[in-house]
Image: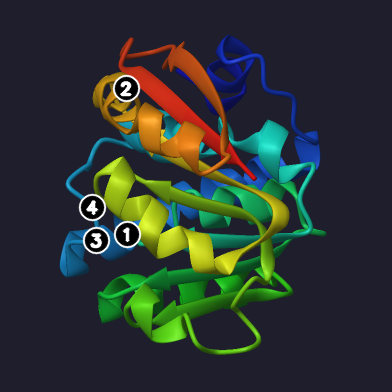
């Protein structure tokens, strides 16, 4: 299924000029993956759906944000697609696997992306750095860890009034239910967004937590 149809299936509208850049991201990911094993997804249609379109389900949040932190971004998802479609968004992505960060930096150079920082390391190493602590109005993570653990990792980086959006599969409902009492006690506003990817029908759950 072509990328525009995938996005239409998710009711997402992007500037048509960004579509060739997104397509190039997919092509470069597959090219690098053949020798560097960046992702288990090797079919181009699946890359378009499960990396690009899936990442762009966060567009409604990214369009309201100024500075995004993507924790455990792997080869750059959702950080790179969001940056391509929202060029004014300042992005910091962090991953512990060097070859995946190398790929992100390659894409930044190849596509001429500005104000995108790909960091190699663990997110805990940034918590005490003044330029990052409480420095983001949007923090994201895709299938990184349990929601309770993610909250511990992400909270130091959120500005007052910022939001954390955890990208989950069907397990998101269960994880949120288990954490509901703690979230309510600590004053978090909670929103749950359920959707299905248009080609595979895979279930996705976006858990939005706001202070």
Please give left or right for residue 145 compared with residue 63 in the image: left
Q: CA distance from mark 3 to mark 2?
A: 33 Å
Residue indicated by mark 2: 177
Quarter of the figure that contains the N terminus:
top left
Q: Earlier in the sequence, mark 2 or mark 4?
A: 4
Cα–Cα gap, marks 3 and 1:
10 Å
Secondary structure at badge 4 equals loop
On the image, the x and y values in percent for residue 203 come to 33, 16
The nearer-to-camera label among 3 and 1 is 3
Front position in the image: 162 or 81: 162
Frontmost of labels 1 and 4 is 4
Which residue matches tag 4? 39
Q: Earlier in the sequence, mark 3 or mark 2?
A: 3
The Cα atoms of the two marked residues, 2 and 4, are separated by 30 Å
Q: Circle 2 sits in a helix, a strand or a loop, which is it? A: helix
- Comparing 40 with 143, the one in front is 143
Measured in 3D between alpha carbons, the distance from the residue under mark 3 to the one under mark 4, in whole angstroms, is 4 Å
């Amino acid at each position: 299924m072509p990328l525009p149809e995938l996005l239409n299936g998710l009711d997402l509208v992007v500037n048509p000029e960004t579509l060739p850049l997104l397509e190039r991201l997919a092509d470069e990911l597959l090219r690098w993956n053949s020798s560097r094993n960046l992702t288990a997804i090797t079919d181009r249609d699946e890359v378009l759906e499960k990396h690009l379109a899936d990442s762009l389900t966060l567009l409604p949040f990214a369009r309201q944000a100024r500075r995004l932190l993507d924790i455990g971004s792997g080869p750059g998802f959702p950080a790179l697609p969001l940056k391509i479609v929202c060029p004014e968004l300042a992005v910091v992505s962090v991953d512990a696997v060097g070859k995946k960060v190398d790929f992100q930096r390659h894409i930044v150079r190849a596509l001429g992306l500005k104000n995108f920082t790909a960091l190699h390391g663990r997110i805990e190493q940034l918590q005490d750095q003044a330029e990052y602590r409480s420095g983001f109005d949007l923090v994201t993570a895709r299938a990184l860890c349990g929601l309770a653990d993610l909250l511990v990792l992400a909270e130091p980086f959120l500005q007052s009034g910022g939001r954390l959006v955890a990208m989950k599969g069907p397990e998101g409902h269960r994880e949120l239910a288990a954490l509901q009492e703690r979230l309510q006690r600590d004053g978090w506003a909670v929103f749950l967004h359920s959707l299905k990817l248009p080609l595979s029908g895979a279930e996705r759950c976006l858990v939005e937590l706001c202070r």
